[in-house]
Amino acid sequence: MTLLPYSIPKNIWLALLIALAIVFSGQFLIHHIPLLKRDVVATGFLCDMVITFPVIYYFLVIRPLKLRKWSIMLVITLCCAVAYVILPEHQRSYIIQLRKLTVLIELGVLIYSIRKIGKIRAEYKKLQFEFPDIAYNLYKSLASVFGDGIYVKLVASELTVLRFGLLCWKKQKQSSTATDQYTVYKESNYPLLFGVILFACIVEITGLHVVLLHYSKTAALIVSILSVYGMIFMVSDLSAILKSPVLVMSDKLLLRTGLRWRAVVDRNNIASIEKIKDTFQPDINCFKGSIMKNSANLLLTFKHPVNIERLYRKPVWVDKMIMSIDQADDFTAELIR
C-alpha cells in the first residue's frame, strides 16, 4: 500500500503480543477451570484488561513514542469491548459501570475531533488540488491538526484502507495537473489473479469459522472479524491499484503501485529508462516496485537518489527501480523526448 513514512516499532509489536496473550489465556482459563473458581479468574482477567494492559501500553508505546496521552482512552475502550465479549454474563455489569466513568472523557475527545473536521477537509481539498494522492493527502491533512505522530499515521492508514476497501465502487476524480496517466495492472492480468485468490480466501475462512464454532464461539467471532478486515484490506489494495495510475506532469512524476508505495520524481532527475525482459534480475539496491514479482517491464535509473515512501515500513532512498507500466513504450517516449 502507500506512502506513510514509518515502520511499526518493536514496542507496538510487543504490546500486541501481550494483549493477545492476556486475551487468549483469559479465554482459556475462564472456560476450563472449575466453576467455583471461575468468578475469581474472571475478575483477574477484567483487571488485566482494563488496568494492567493499559498501563503496559502507556509505558511501552505512548511514553517512549511520545504519543498523545488521550489515546489511552481508545485502548481502554477496546479492552472493555473485548472483556465484555469474554466475561461471564453476570460480570458484564462491571464493564458497563466502568464505561460510565470514561464516557465523559471520550465525549470530550470526540467533540474536539468533530470540531476539527472542517479544518481537516479544507486542508485535504487544498492538497488534492495541488497534488492528487488520496492516502498521502489524508495523512497530511490529519497531521496538520493532530500533529505528525505514529498514532496519526496509523489512523490515516486505516482510514485510507477503509476508504478504498468499503468505497471501492466510487470513481476517482481525474487529476487536473497530470498531462498523462499510465495504469500498472492490465498487462499482468492482476485483477483476474486477485479474483481467484479472494474466492479461495472466502471459502477457507468460511470453513475455518465453522470448525471454530465447535470449540469456541468467541474465538470464531474474533477470527472471522480479523478475516473480514483482511479481505477489506485486499479489496482496498486492488481498488487503489485500479484507481491510482502513474501520473506524468509537466515537471514531475508520481510513481506508485496503488497504496503499496509512492515516489515523487523530478522529470529532470531521470537518467534512463530501459525495457527489461523476464530473465532480468535486479541487484540488491534496486527497488522492486512492480505489481507482481514477474511483471516488471521497465528499469528506471535516477541521477540522484529518490525517496520511496511505503506503508508500515521505513522510507528508502534508491537510485534505480523496476516497475510494471502498461503502454511502456509510450511512457518511455514521453519522458525521453
Image (tube, rainbow, N blue to C red):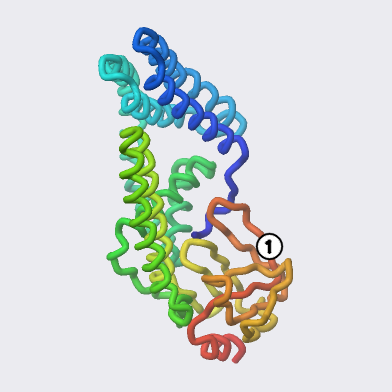
Decide: is 255 above or below 179: above
Residue pictured at 58% horizontal, 82% vertical:
297
Which of these two is toward me, 204 or 148?
Answer: 204
Query: Left or right: 2 with respect to 308?
Result: left
User: Is residue 277 at all visible to an observer of this figure?
Assistant: yes
User: Is residue 178 at all visible to an observer of this figure?
Assistant: no
Callout 1: 10 Å neighbours few (<14), some, many (20+)?
A: some
Q: Of all residues shown, which one is farthest toward the top?
A: 36
Kind of residue sitting beneath label 1: Trp
Q: Percent from the top left, x then y, of residue 128? A: 41, 63
Residue pictured at 34% horizontal, 29% vertical:
81
The quadrant in which the C terminus is found is bottom right
Residue pictured at 39% horizontal, 74% vertical:
192
Q: Percent from the top left, x then y, of residue 83? A: 36, 24
Query: Left or right: 285 with respect to 72?
Result: right
Which of these two is toward me, 22 or 201?
Answer: 201
Decide: is 10 above or below 323: above
Residue 40: image quadrant is top left
Decide: is 196 above or below 30: below
Residue pictured at 49% horizontal, 30% vertical:
19
